[in-house]
Amino acid sequence: MSHHRYPICPTSGKVRYGELKDIKLAMRQTAWDRSRARVNEVACSRREIRSYECSDCRGWHLTSQPARPIRLVPATKLTMLIPGPAAQAMRRTAGAAGLKVSTAA
């Protein structure tokens, strides 16, 4: 029988927190544990720095891994739309009827 208040994720083996409020409490506890260890000048094994949602168990886990950097992908060049034959025919018809033709979309 587990002594954890929360169940264990079967995939990762980590403690599974059900809601974000539980994660906030757990992060506060880890910060408290680290600060008490600094005051007492002892080593602390708590290294959790962030949380993430598990795609397997749909719960939340704590991790000591920093967040992955966001990779920016260069935008593709904007291409000018070349009107097809139907648009060209409509412009010719509008021009022949004496209507003003606008190119704004």
Image (spheres, rainbow, N blue to C red):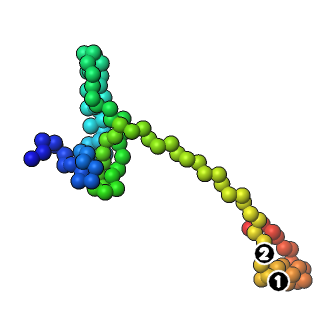
Q: Which mark is residue 83?
A: 2
Specify the amino acid type for callout 2.
Answer: Pro
In the image, what residue occupies the spot 72% across and 58% down?
77
**Mark 1: which secondary structure?**
helix
Residue 16 in sight from this viewpoint:
no
For the residues labelled 1 and 2, the Cα–Cα distance comes to 10 Å
Residue at 34% x, 56% y is: 55
Q: Position of residue 14 (x, y in %)?
A: 26, 45
Q: Is residue 42 above or below residue 49?
A: above
* Left or right: 5 in relation to 75: left
Residue 93: where, in percent of width, then height? 85, 84
**Where does label 1 land, which residue?**
89
Element under label 2? loop
Residue 100 point in image, percent of width and height: 86, 74
Tell me if mark 2 has few (under 14), some (14-19) or many (20+) residues whose alpha carbon lies within 10 angstroms of its own.
few
Q: Amino acid at mark 1?
A: Ala
Please report the residue visible at 78 percent of the width from the left and 72 percent of the height from the top. Answer: 82
Q: Is residue 25 left or right of residue 67?
A: left
Number of marks present in the image shown? 2
